[in-house]
Amino acid sequence: MARALALAARGRETATPNPSVGCVIAKGGRVIGEGFHARAGEPHAEAAALAACGESPEGASVYLTLEPCSHHGRTPPCADALVAARVGRVVAALEDPNPLVKGRGLAKLREAGIRVETGLMAEAAAEAHRGFLARMSRGRPWMRIKSAASLDGRIALANGESRWISGEASRRDVHALRARSCAMLTGIGTVLRDDPELTVRHVPCARQPRRVVIDSRLELPDTAKILAGEPPLVLTVSEDRERRAALEARGAEVVMVPAVAGGKTDLAAVARLLADRGFNEVTVETGAKLNGSLLAAGVIDEIVLYLAPMLLGDPAQGLYALPELRNLAEAPRLRIVDVRAVGPDLRITARLES
């Protein structure tokens, strides 16, 4: 199963919106075939592993990071392929929460007389598939906020200067984080202030994440760097047809989203829309205001914070614009899951307690 999880990681950047499943087929104490799902529309992990077998898989044990599919999509059902191959045992780390599968693949195997087991390395598999599992079970992607700050928690000087707080090694690490993301989300304030590209540039990348801008009033300049290359998705509550036409002429896809009180964007609706678009993992790179609003909306799962060994002082800009708390019991609670040095900086990964 550990090998299957390692194989799954190979398709992490490219399999979306499908899960990047890994598969190992063993017989007589030997691995006779292995595979992973590389891209939607291409063979799933089970089919790739069966095709790679150097001998008959009849009676073999199959190790899968996720339940085999049981429905016809772009490819035939993998459960049928395993039944046809007459394998003897299937060990799946997790049941697939996709309503089109959800136990049906395992049931089909059992009906064919194949021994089925689940739960082996389930925690590691849930981590590997966290974006897909979130989208299928909660109707929104796994969403993380990435920030770089000084040791006193400041992301920019009072005048807006922020390049560069983090070191070169951290910036490369951020691009690796972008590479595994299906989409990069930012706000119009960040675009107007920093004019970011939000592309993967400093690490190998098989496909660029989709760039998404929350732009309530359609203020995105025609000259913005984010309009270059793959067209961005612009989410707005504005009905300004002239601005919409201008952005669409530049290639942007402009989509109306619901508004909440005060004419602001409904961020819960944004999260649902991103899930509907098939985005499994979304990384947010923006300023304190939108960071705080996303946290308050309850759509953030994880914070990845790069802390640089410098101090910027009280006048500098903070990380998250959150409402004033009346007592500590109201404070959002997080669980730190990883701390490591990245060059001279410290990277802290923390998850919101559900």
Image: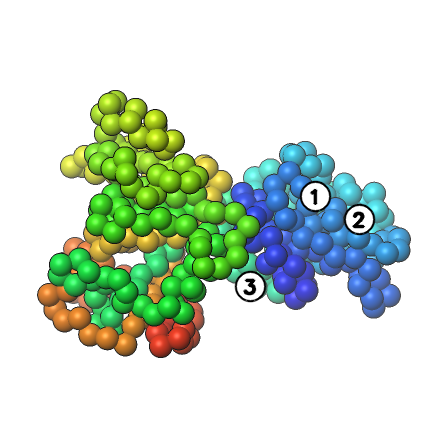
First of labels 3, 1 by sequence position: 1
158 relative position to 175: left or right: left
The residue wearing badge 3 is 123
Q: Amino acid at mark 3?
A: Glu
Query: Circles 2 and 1: CB distance less than 8 Å?
Result: yes
From the image, state whether disc 2 or disc 3 is nearer to you: 2
Residue at 39% from the left image edge and 43% from the top image edge: 211
Label annotation for residue 43: 1
Image spot of residue 59 (x, y percent): 86, 55
Image spot of residue 306 (x, y percent): 34, 68
Secondary structure under tag 2 reads helix
Secondary structure under tag 1 reads loop
The residue wearing badge 2 is 51
Q: Which quadrant is the N terminus positioned in?
A: bottom right
First of labels 2, 3 by sequence position: 2
Residue at 25% from the left image edge and 51% from the top image edge: 194
First of labels 2, 1 by sequence position: 1
Q: What distance separates the C-alpha of mark 3 from that of mark 1?
A: 26 Å
Q: Amino acid at mark 1?
A: Pro
Q: Amino acid at mark 2?
A: Ala
